Amino acid sequence: MSIRPSLPRFRFATVAAVSLIVVLGGIGTARAADDPPRAQYHEMHANCEVNHRLSDDPIVFPGLAGASHNHTFIGNPTTNANSTPASLVGGATSCEDTLDASGYWFPTLLRSGVPVIPDAPTVYYKSGVKDYRTVKPFPAGFKLLVGDVHTPDAAHFLGNWQCPGFKGNDIPASCPSGSSLVVRLTAPSCWDGVHLDTTDHKSHMAFPVSGVCPADHPVPLPMLEIKLPYPLDNGSTAGLAYSSGASYSFHYDFMNGWDPARQAYLVSYCINGGRQCNGFGEDPKNP
């Protein structure tokens, strides 16, 4: 199949002009003078299977095997304490797109100490800014920690828990029989254009403000949102807790292992193109 990505057009102007291009670290950030065409979707999906669990965290505790609470991993099956973005690229993966060898991991959910494995984990790549045409791919070497294991209580948890008839910031007392319990958490999507990682693994990213990236984090990258459906026994949530602590300690990590050309194509075709791409990078309703 011939792939012809449709790239967004940007208007270049002087500093004094209304439209401004800021080039940071070789990546141009654009605000188009014209409004983007209306698009209900501007996203792609990483649909992946769980492939291993380890008490490793190559972002927070690099090179220190066993130093972390237990994590559940999807994506690259080799991800461990010694992994780097460069070591992941070109490797195997449990994701539908065989060129996404990224590492994704999150604390292991336990029921009375026994691991609960999520069904069909998905990591959405979306536009967090109004002008979805300006979103850029994650740069090579990029790392990110989303959420905070030290969140003090459920009221401060930035994600949400869902099951039929319930949506809230903590695990409900129960769910309907036969249903799953789903946790979702969205990442900031505006990059400072310089750092691939920072000491807290977060400060190089910020959330958009009113649909626009702030001046100190001007580069729009894909907005990650993880979705983890956990199977329940007859709807019971009794005894559930994370290896990291309470429900609101949930967080996740991303280490970019994408084939660069493939990710660039998908961001252009799916996000910039206003499509809703499945895990294979296709939008059957809008080819």
Image (cartoon, rainbow, N blue to C red):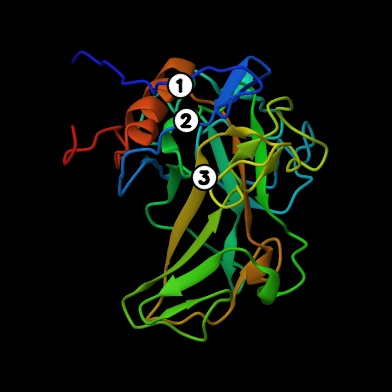
Dots 3, 1 in contact, CB < 8 A: no
Q: Nearer the viewer, residue 41 or 241?
A: 41
Q: Which residue is mark 2?
A: 32
Whether residue 13 can be seen here = yes
Q: Marks 3 and 1: which is nearer the front?
A: 1
What's under tag 1, amino acid-wise?
Phe
Q: Quadrant of the N terminus?
A: top left
Q: Quadrant of the C terminus?
A: top left
- Who's the residue at 64% across and 28% down the image? 142
Which numbered circle lies on residue 149? none
Choose the circle earlier in sequence order: 2 or 3: 2
Gap between marks 1 and 2 measured at Cα: 6 Å
What's under tag 2, amino acid-wise?
Ala
Q: Nearer the viewer, residue 150 or 112?
A: 150
Work out whether 159 lies above or below 65.
below
Which numbered circle lies on residue 224? 3
Work out whether 64 lies above or below 14.
below
Name the spot of residue 144 as percent of width and height, x first: 66, 39
Is residue 76 shown left or right of residue 59?
left
Name the spot of residue 7 as percent of width and height, x first: 37, 20
Indicate the quadrant where residue 169 lies.
bottom right
- Who's the residue at 58% across and 45% down the image? 105
Name the spot of residue 136 as percent of width and height, x first: 51, 28
Dots 1, 2 in contact, CB < 8 A: yes
Choose the circle earlier in sequence order: 3 or 1: 1
Choose the circle earlier in sequence order: 1 or 2: 1
Is residue 173 shown left or right of residue 203?
left
Whether residue 98 can be seen here = no
What's under tag 3, amino acid-wise?
Leu
Which numbered circle lies on residue 10? 1
Is residue 93 shown left or right of residue 179?
right
